[in-house]
Image: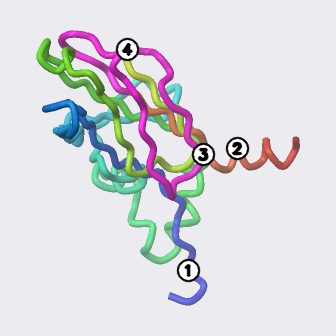
């Protein structure tokens, strides 16, 4: 294992929490996990592929047989293109009238790697710049009755780092 680099990964792990007040003194919290119905693509591609959330771009590409195992022999060298692209993850989920009546609704993110923009129904709700922290976004104003679309755009850390270095 000495000398082996761990490939860069994009990671998304999130849950949606509906924060409701059961009484004035003690708010109750109910949660709905948003780990299903995810698709992903490289920015600019037209084909969406099935994704696993939580997960990584590398494991999603590996599961779809679009790349070889990065830990086998020198395969990692052929996969350097992955962290130079921007990636988009997207999911749809339903919201009922009952949920919309709640006083507070937030999305909780347990990790978005690293430079991300999160959109709910095409409205920017969050920008991230650190994989090693949790994020919370108040989304009640952005939710609508019926289907809602959550989209996460993950910027290439290589391109972002070069931009920061040049600045």
Q: Residue at x 51, y 58 (%)?
A: 132
**Disc 4 to disc 3, C-alpha distance:** 24 Å
Residue in the foreground of this view, choosing between 32 and 71: 32
Residue drawn at x 31%, y 16% as measured from the top left: 143
Marks 1/3: CA–CA distance = 26 Å
Q: Which mark is residue 4?
A: 1
Tell us which disc is closer to us: 2 or 3: 3
Q: Position of residue 125 (x, y in %)?
A: 48, 25
Q: Residues within 10 Å of mark 3 (few under 14, many from 20)?
A: some
Residue lying at the far front of the rendered structure: 25
* Residue 129 numbered tag: 3
Q: State which mark lies toward you, 4 or 1.
A: 4
Q: Locate residue 43 relative to residue 91 in the image: left or right.
A: right
Residue highlighted by disc 4: 141
Which of the two residues, 108 or 123, is positioned nearer the viewer here? 108
At 38% from the left edge and 44% from the top edge, which residue is drawn?
109
């Amino acid at each position: 294992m000495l000398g082996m680099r761990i490939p860069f990964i994009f990671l998304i792990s999130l849950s949606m929490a509906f924060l409701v007040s059961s009484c004035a003194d003690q708010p109750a919290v109910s949660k709905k996990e948003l780990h299903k119905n995810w698709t992903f693509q490289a920015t600019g591609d037209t084909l969406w592929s099935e994704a696993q959330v939580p997960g990584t771009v590398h494991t999603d590409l590996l599961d779809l047989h679009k790349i070889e195992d990065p830990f086998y022999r020198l395969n990692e060298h052929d996969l350097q293109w992955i962290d130079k692209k921007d990636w988009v993850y997207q999911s749809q989920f339903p919201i009922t009238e009952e949920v919309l009546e709640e006083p507070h609704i937030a999305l909780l993110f347990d990790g978005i790697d690293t430079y991300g923009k999160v959109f709910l129904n095409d409205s920017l709700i969050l920008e991230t710049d650190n994989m090693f922290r949790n994020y919370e976004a108040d989304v009640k104003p952005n939710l609508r009755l019926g289907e809602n679309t959550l989209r996460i755009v993950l910027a290439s850390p290589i391109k972002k780092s070069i931009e920061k270095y040049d600045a």
